[in-house]
Amino acid sequence: MLVSAEEMLTKAKAGRYAVGQFNINNLEWTKAILLTAQELNSPVILGVSEGAGKYMCGYKTVVGMVNGMLEELNITVPVALHLDHGSYEGAKACIEAGFSSIMFDGSHYPIEENVEKTKELVAICKEKGMSIEAEVGSIGGEEDGVVGAGECADPDECKMIADLGVTMLAAGIGNIHGKYPDNWAGLSFETLDAVQQKTGSMPLVLHGGTGIPADMIQKAISLGVSKINVNTECQLSFQEATRKYIEDGKDKEGKGFDPRKLLAPGTEAIKATVKEKMELFGSVGKA
């Protein structure tokens, strides 16, 4: 059964580790992430962007697939199904469809409107026992057409949004989505520290976990980050393994063209990436 992310993140913050949010893009992705979480006895958050939700035929299809897998694969570790960078309308649709967690990204609204919409969604989520993530200060890079420069959040604005009763807060600390450019200045730990001091025990979220060096990830966790989002890295390992399979001519041997065979190496590669991240984040054995 899907759970809210609240309990797993409260435990992570207290225990100084982080739970990974791994974005899902199709059946193979979902299966690979769930099996790895179960094998490592780690809590996990499945992230769904609005674009990926559309690609997978809508939120109800996603909920049906994930719930079916939890049952058929006998998954017993805590699993949250979370809308990533949701619009106001998207958040409402996911609540309706049976997600257990949402992110409302109101960072592009004027702060007053962000506050108003967040308040409304917090009330609905509380009533339904769902967790809700809010964002202050845009995360850089591009995700589903949303482009941000990687600005740093204002700690006072963070406190204002945290005080509305959200479960977790994503604060921009110079992190970006996708591959990091060569001239990236690194994470702003001063901003993170200032945000943590204003928001206390609230779990903080680090978006754009792909390509941030391991020591920075560990430092961020020590400063209150309890949830780290990974997407691009799984996509890259899937692509690499699939390319190798085809370049080696495996798709032309026997029934190598069968999609179950064709997609198997990529699926294994996703598992390996997820395992590596769960070990780095410290969530192994924490279910």
Image (spheres, rainbow, N blue to C red):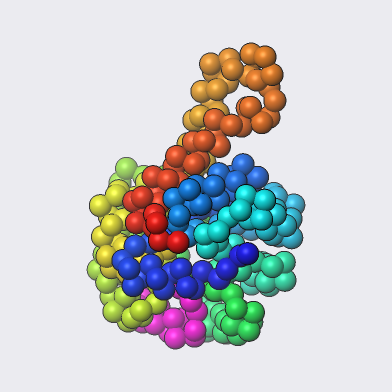
* Residue 142: percent from left, percent from top: 50, 52
Whether residue 84 is visible, yes or no, is no
Location of residue 261 with respect to 98 vertically, above or below: above
- Tell me, yes or no, whether the highlighted magenta stretch contains residue 156: yes
Residue nearest the viewer, comparing 35 with 250: 35
Measuring 55% from the left and 71% from the top, which residue is drawn there?
A: 4
* Residue 78: percent from left, percent from top: 52, 63
Quadrant location of the N terminus in the rendered image:
bottom right
Residue nearest the viewer, comparing 180 with 29: 29
Location of residue 245 with respect to 30 vertically, above or below: above
* Residue 165: percent from left, percent from top: 49, 84
Location of residue 165 with respect to 81 vertically, above or below: below
Measuring 39% from the left and 77% from the top, which residue is drawn there?
A: 202
Location of residue 184 with respect to 203 vertically, above or below: above
- Tell me, yes or no, whether the highlighted magenta stretch contains residue 87: no
Measuring 55% from the left and 44% from the top, which residue is drawn there?
A: 32
Q: Quadrant of residue 284?
A: bottom left
Measuring 25% from the left and 52% from the top, which residue is drawn there?
A: 215
Q: Quadrant of residue 3?
A: bottom right
Report whether 1 appears left or right of 143.
right
- Write the start and end of the magenta stretch as one range: 152-170
Report whether 245 appears left or right of 66.
left
Whether residue 126 is visible, yes or no, is yes
Quadrant location of the C terminus in the rendered image:
bottom left
Q: Quadrant of residue 198?
A: bottom left
* Residue 282: percent from left, percent from top: 34, 56
Count of labels in the image:
0
